[in-house]
Every structure is written in structure tokens, then in C-alpha cells.
């Protein structure tokens, strides 16, 4: 079975739907009397609450991912130590293209 992230918004919306279903079942069985328009009043706040929980979850996970990305050895978590490349190919470096030489290092003129 594959693992998946916990989704609090889905949990809240599922619990609200189960509560509403339980209320209508209790109305059908007899102990409660629930007006038919109850779902129209209770379901939108439940959807808004689930949306807010989803937004908070998204922001918390994004912040956590940024923190984990910052834990590398370099300044941006990429493993880069922040030092400059010494063989950049400039005229004094002797690297590729230095002083107009060919790739073999032999001058053409």
C-alpha cells in the first residue's frame, strides 16, 4: 500500500458530511425531526472550513519544504559551497577559450 499525505481538509469535510448523514438517518428512524433545508445551511460552512484547513495545510507544507531545502551544505541547499568557479574560461585561467586558443590548447597563430 502506498503512503499518501494526511489531508485535514478532507477529514473535516468527510466528518461534516457524515454528521449531516447521521442527522438525516436519525430523522428517518424517528428520534429527531430535521427540516429538509438543514443541509443548505450546514454544508456551506463545512465546505468553507475545509477550504480554510486546506489552505493552512498548503502553507504549512510549503514552509516546511522551504526549510528542508535550506538545510543543504550550500547557501540554497543545493550542495554548492558558495565558492566561485576558478576555471571560468577567462583569458588568464587557461580554461576553454583562453587567449584565443583552440580546444587542444594550441594557438592558431
Image (cartoon, helix red, strand yellow):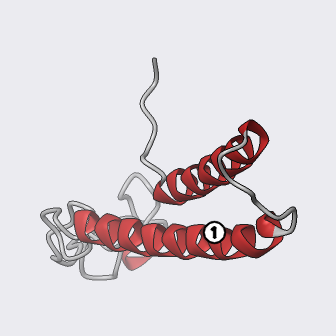
The foreground one among 25 and 32 is: 32
| Residue occupying image coordinates x 34% and y 74% | 63
Q: Position of residue 83 (x, y in %)?
A: 15, 76
Q: Position of residue 8 (x, y in %)?
A: 46, 57
State the count of labels. Answer: 1
Label 1 Cα crowd, 10 Å radius (few <14 / some 14-19 / many 20+):
some
Residue lying at the far front of the rendered structure: 31
Q: Is residue 62 left or right of residue 42?
A: left
Furthest residue in direction bottom, as rendered: 91
User: Helix, strand or loop at disc 1?
Assistant: helix
Instruction: Give 43 or 37, whichever is nearer the viewer.
Output: 37
Residue depicted at 32% across the width and 74% down the height? 88
Q: Is residue 109 visible?
A: no
Residue 33, above or below 30: below
Indicate left or right for 8 with 17 as reference: left
Q: Residue at 82% across / 70% down in the picture?
A: 40
Residue 69 falls in image quadrant:
bottom left
The answer to which of 8 and 39 lies nearer the viewer is 39
> Residue 12: x, y in percent?
52, 58
- Residue 13 in view (yes/no): yes
Placement of the N terminus among the 4 image quadrants: top left
Give the residue pinned by disc 1.
46
Farthest top residue?
Answer: 1
Residue at point 45%, 75% (across, down): 56
| Residue 17 vertical placement versus 85 (above, below) | above
Q: Position of residue 41 (x, y in %)?
A: 76, 75
User: Which quadrant of the view contains residue 26?
Assistant: top right
Q: Quadrant of residue 79?
A: bottom left
Residue most toward the right?
Answer: 36
Q: Is residue 25 left or right of residue 93?
A: right
Amino acid at each position: 500500500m502506498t503512503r499518501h499525505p494526511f489531508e485535514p481538509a478532507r477529514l473535516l469535510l468527510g466528518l461534516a458530511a457524515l454528521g449531516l448523514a447521521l442527522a438525516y438517518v436519525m430523522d428517518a428512524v424517528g428520534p429527531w425531526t430535521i427540516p429538509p433545508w438543514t443541509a443548505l445551511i450546514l454544508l456551506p460552512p463545512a465546505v468553507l472550513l475545509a477550504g480554510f484547513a486546506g489552505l493552512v495545510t498548503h502553507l504549512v507544507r510549503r514552509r516546511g519544504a522551504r526549510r528542508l531545502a535550506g538545510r543543504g551544505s550550500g547557501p540554497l541547499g543545493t550542495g554548492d559551497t558558495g565558492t566561485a568557479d576558478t576555471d571560468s574560461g577567462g583569458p588568464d585561467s587557461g580554461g576553454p577559450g583562453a587567449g584565443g586558443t583552440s580546444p587542444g590548447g594550441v594557438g592558431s597563430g
